[in-house]
């Protein structure tokens, strides 16, 4: 255990996000969680793509690699495969991860290499000054969609489930109480942990998540799920989620109306794939809460370990390698040209 | 060359081939894609090599996976030049063509020399297949083959007959007709069937009945040559062993050589090899070969696309391995942005481009060397990248080692250009002896000491920056694609600093120019009337043509570039010693353009972009036109 403090995880560079940007809060939660869990600076590697959120590695006192737009999962994969001892984090935005980098994100999640991917979803392109992103809500007016977007938004958690992700969590930037434990669980997960953070961009998309964050009304619009716990939510803890009677899917019920009781509600099972799909989609319609917490977690074969099967137990010395290479080269048919053959 | 290039190949020692059918013979097998042509050709090549001949091969297979049988575009062929002299090329004209169907005859008849030998499977010449091949009449009967020696044989039925006793179905028996043919051709070259039999036994050890049938077919073909009354003009070829340098040999193709060489290079650098790639013709076998080196510690990663492949390799290099990625033109185009990142972050990385023909998807199975501009200049910003290129398959191993050495010594990404011909062609290769000083290790020092560590502090001699690997205590630092402050490596958009950093990246290439070998003359004198300047796989035909012309007393020299960027520092001086410099290239004049931008020597360009290497006679014509026949 090191006794590093959260501030020890901060680099000496000035943080250059807009005042009020949600990214600050995520950075703070990260610093705190790493300190709390005894992470070592030298073993922590932060890889990012391009975008406001992707500046994060510069603000870490750990190893960091700010790469190119969308490709962070691929670079992180190479680093982790080369050195499985590293604690590898990927920081990406909704544009970086789901637009240009969608393919890499998909395959990283599918492979399940042990690393954490934190996607900052502000439903906008921040760095390039406010164009709509693949998660922008339909109809949103931006410089590139003056008449309002006509695209269907992508739901990152839903995407992650589709990709076969084995750890999917969602949080809000400023809710450290939810985000901190999620980051910690993500770090502990032996596989690719996908964490979506709903992040406020004060400049280009200010307030999109206000209804979820609002101290008073927020609890009516969000539910924090916990494995083994019934799905109760609401300002007065008077709402819940149950399986739709006589069909698939979920529905919101009021506990005091129509005789519904807590016993009718679903108990969160983070290993239930079908439930995770439904939870990820919840919140898209009026009256439904957006689900926060760990939506899905299921242990599965870790890619790095699986792909190391067949490698030598211990790294070979240079001599051993050359000897084995010599033998491999000679495993083909060889022949000698001697003096008399000439 | 420092890394042992001179040691690895015997070819420098051999006399020049002069007389077809005496010094060397070129035989071409052609048939339907399903006829096992590639295997037949490879076996003949292998046994010729084992006999001690020099060989050069040229596999030519259809781009379509399952082209309809009997069609011209479904024809698969394998050319082989067998010599007791240096052969270097796959040859201009075919001495003997084995055509297992009418389409094969039609496609390759044109390349057969006057009075050349045609071995034909008559059984395949049905009315339907003749029509399918586009002949108006049966070429065996309409007199159109009179300028050749035609040996029409009932190969299919002879094979069936030979395998009657085995109880194999007629269909399975017919599958062995390639072995029957190989047996006959082995007889033609006065070779025994023993090596091939041995190979068949090993290959089919789990299916003894298949092994038996193939061996019987092989022996039957051989016996047929012995006992059948072949026409008197069908004489056997007597090609003596070549006076190769003493040593242990195997045959190797360029892709194998490159993969093994990269592994050896990483090893000599005392690093682990990480190969990230995405399948593409003709580079895929690099991935296949590295994948088989797992028990030697090599990590291979089949990524979701070329971008991820190079990015993973960059990540691996950052984490302390030697990252390598390989692809072909279109895939290299995708990697471009990441190459820029590797240049900015000054990480060692080897990028192998097995070039193929044309822009976009172009000619996937055909060879060309037209990605030189892409390699040298194809990026945004001033983004210098060293480029090297082996000249033939036997050189790929050493070039793989050289790539690892330059990339790690100077902390830079580097591109190796091979091409479809080098990748697929095989040649006898003298196995490396790692105790040879040519393979002196060049272990890389990764920084451990935090004292005075600055991630962008450059060694004044090599211009390398220190390589500090994640996991090392007290050396934490951040890198990325944004411009960095010299020394600290922090982000800097300062104009003066960008000027300085641009210069530093350029100086890296200057440092490399100082550490590469001086340009030598491949053959001929160091001054004279004409220099033929080549790079990559045009080596063979240029070499043969130039050396033949020299024997005729012509003043012609062959200069061949392995280091294309930076150029060898003495190149301008060397070239200025010739009245004329002509560059035969399998592109539309790219090296010529590069040189015109770099030096004050007039160079002329001759281009060949026909999907195949230059023919010797095409180069000979260049020489004759320049010097007078
Ligand atoms: C190849 C390439 N294309 C485009 C860009 C421009 N670009 C930089 S960041 C970005 C979008 C970032 O949006 P997001 O990922 O949502 O991150 P945010 O800035 O909102 O945190 C774009 C389009 C680029 N840097 N590289
Ligand atoms: S533009 Fe938006 S996302 Fe970017 S730093 Fe400013 S507030 Fe944050």
Image (tube, coloured by chain):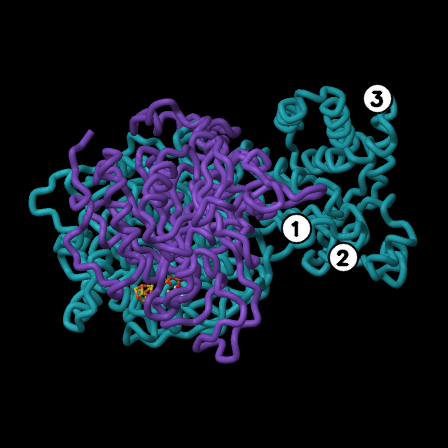
Chain colours: A purple, B cyan
- Circle 1 residue: B61
User: Dot 1: within a 10 Å radius of its alpha carbon, few (fewer than 14), some, or many (20 or more) residues?
Assistant: many
Point out residue B106 in the picture as x, y percentages from the top left corner: 77, 58
Badge 3 crowding class, 10 Å Cα cut-off, few under 14, some 14 to 19, many 20 or more, is some
Res B175 label = none
**Residue B451 visible in the current orientation:** yes
Give percent across and percent down for residue B15.
Answer: 45, 47
| Callouts 3 and 1 on one subunit | yes
Q: Chain of mark 1?
A: B
- Mark 3, residue position: B166
Specify the subunit that label 2 lies on: B
What is the CA distance from the residue labelled 2 to the residue labelled 1?
A: 11 Å
The quarter of the image holding the N terminus of chain A is top left
| Residue pointed to by mark 2 | B72
Residue A312 percent across, percent down from the top left: 39, 25
Q: Quadrant of residue B170?
A: top right
Front residue of B533/B63: it is B63
> Which quadrant of the rendered structure holds the C terminus of chain A?
top left
Q: Is residue B438 left or right of residue B247?
A: left
Q: Residue at x 30, y 57 (%)?
A: A23
A26 left or right of B551 in image: left
Residue B167: give x, y in percent of width and height: 87, 22
Give the SS element for disc 2: helix
């Amino acid at each position: 255990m090191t006794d590093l403090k959260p501030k020890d995880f901060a680099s000496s560079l000035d943080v250059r996000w807009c005042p009020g940007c949600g990214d600050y809060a995520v950075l703070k939660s990260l610093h705190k969680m790493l300190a709390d869990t005894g992470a070592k600076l030298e073993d922590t590697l932060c890889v990012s793509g391009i975008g406001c959120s992707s500046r994060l590695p510069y603000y870490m006192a750990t190893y960091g690699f700010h790469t190119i737009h969308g490709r962070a999962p691929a670079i992180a994969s190479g680093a982790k495969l080369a050195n499985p001892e590293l604690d590898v984090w990927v920081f990406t935005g909704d544009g970086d991860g789901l637009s240009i980098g969608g393919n890499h994100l998909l395959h990283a999640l599918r492979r399940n290499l042990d690393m954490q991917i934190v996607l900052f979803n502000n439903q906008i392109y921040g760095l390039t000054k406010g164009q709509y992103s693949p998660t922008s809500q339909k109809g949103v007016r931006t410089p590139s969609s003056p008449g309002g977007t006509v695209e269907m938004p992508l739901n990152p958690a839903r995407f992650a489930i589709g990709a076969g992700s084995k750890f999917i969590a969602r949080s809000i930037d400023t809710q450290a109480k939810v985000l901190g434990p999620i980051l910690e669980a993500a770090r502990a997960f032996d596989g690719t942990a996908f964490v979506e953070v709903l992040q406020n961009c004060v400049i280009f998309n200010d307030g999109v998540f206000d209804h979820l964050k609002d101290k008073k009304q927020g609890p009516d619009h969000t539910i924090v799920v916990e494995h083994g716990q019934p799905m109760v939510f609401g300002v007065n803890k008077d709402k819940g989620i149950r399986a739709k009677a006589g069909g698939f899917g979920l529905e919101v019920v009021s506990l005091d109306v129509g005789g519904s009781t807590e016993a009718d509600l679903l108990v969160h099972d983070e290993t239930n794939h079908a439930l995770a799909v439904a939870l990820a989609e919840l919140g898209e319609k009026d009256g439904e809460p957006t689900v926060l917490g760990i939506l899905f977690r299921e242990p599965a074969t870790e890619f790095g370990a699986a792909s190391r099967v067949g490698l030598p137990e211990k790294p070979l010395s240079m001599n051993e390698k050359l000897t084995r290479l010599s033998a491999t080269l000679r495993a083909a048919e060889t022949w000698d040209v001697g003096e008399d053959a000439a | 060359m420092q890394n042992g290039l001179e040691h690895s190949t015997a070819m420098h020692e051999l006399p020049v081939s002069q007389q077809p059918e005496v010094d060397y013979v070129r035989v071409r097998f052609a048939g339907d894609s399903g006829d096992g042509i590639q295997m037949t050709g490879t076996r003949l090549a292998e046994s010729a090599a084992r006999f001690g001949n020099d060989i050069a091969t040229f596999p030519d297979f259809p781009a379509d996976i399952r082209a309809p049988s009997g069609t011209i575009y479904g024809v698969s062929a394998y050319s082989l030049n067998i010599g007791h002299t240096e052969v270097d090329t796959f040859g201009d004209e075919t001495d003997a063509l084995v055509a297992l169907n009418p389409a094969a005859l039609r496609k390759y008849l044109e390349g057969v020399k006057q009075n050349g030998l045609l071995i034909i499977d008559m059984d395949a010449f049905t009315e339907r297949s003749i029509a399918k091949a586009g002949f108006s009449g049966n070429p065996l009967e309409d007199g159109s083959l009179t300028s050749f020696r035609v040996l029409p044989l009932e190969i299919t039925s002879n094979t069936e007959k030979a395998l009657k006793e085995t109880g194999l179905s007629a269909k399975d028996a017919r599958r062995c007709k390639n072995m029957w043919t190989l047996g006959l051709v082995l007889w033609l070259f006065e070779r025994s069937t023993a090596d091939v039999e041995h190979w068949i036994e090993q290959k089919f050890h789990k299916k003894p009945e298949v092994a038996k049938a193939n061996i019987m077919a092989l022996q039957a073909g051989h016996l047929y040559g012995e006992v059948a009354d072949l026409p008197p003009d069908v004489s056997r070829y007597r090609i003596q062993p070549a006076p190769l340098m003493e040593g242990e040999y195997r045959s190797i193709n360029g892709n194998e050589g490159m993969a093994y060489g990269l592994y050896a290079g990483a090893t000599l650098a005392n690093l682990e090899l990480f190969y990230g790639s995405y399948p593409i013709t003709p580079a895929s076998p690099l991935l296949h070969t590295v994948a088989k080196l797992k028990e030697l510690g090599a990590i291979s990663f089949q990524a979701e696309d070329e971008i991820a492949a190079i990015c993973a390799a960059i990540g691996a290099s950052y984490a302390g391995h030697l990252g390598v990625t390989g692809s072909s033109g279109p895939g290299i185009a995708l990697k471009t942005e990441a190459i820029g990142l590797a240049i900015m972050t000054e990480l060692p990385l080897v990028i192998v481009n097995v070039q193929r023909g044309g822009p976009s998807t172009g000619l996937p199975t055909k060879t060309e060397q037209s990605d030189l501009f892409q390699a040298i200049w194809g990026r945004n910003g001033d983004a210098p990248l060293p480029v090297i290129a082996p000249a033939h398959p036997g050189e790929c191993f050493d070039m793989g080692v050289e790539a690892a050495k330059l990339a790690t010594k100077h902390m830079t990404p580097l591109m190796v250009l091979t091409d479809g011909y080098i990748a697929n062609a095989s040649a006898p290769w003298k196995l490396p002896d790692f105790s040879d000083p040519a393979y002196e290790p060049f272990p890389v020092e990764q920084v451990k000491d935090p004292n005075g560590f600055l991630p962008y502090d450059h060694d004044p001699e090599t211009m390398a920056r220190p390589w500090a690997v994640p996991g090392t205590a007290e050396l934490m630092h951040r890198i990325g694609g944004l411009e960095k402050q010299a020394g600290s490596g922090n982000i800097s958009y300062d104009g003066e600093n960008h000027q300085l950093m641009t210069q530093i990246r350029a100086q890296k290439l200057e440092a490399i120019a100082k550490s590469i070998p001086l340009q030598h003359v491949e053959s001929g004198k160091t001054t004279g009337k004409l220099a033929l300047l080549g790079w990559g796989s045009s080596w063979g035909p240029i070499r043969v043509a130039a050396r033949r012309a020299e024997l005729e007393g012509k003043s012609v020299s062959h200069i061949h570039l392995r280091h294309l960027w930076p150029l060898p520092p003495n190149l301008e001086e060397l070239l200025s010693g010739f009245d004329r410099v002509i560059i035969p290239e399998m592109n539309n004049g790219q090296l010529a353009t590069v040189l015109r931008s770099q030096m004050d020597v007039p160079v002329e360009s001759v281009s060949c972009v026909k999907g195949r290497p230059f023919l010797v006679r095409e180069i000979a014509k260049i020489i004759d036109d320049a010097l007078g026949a």
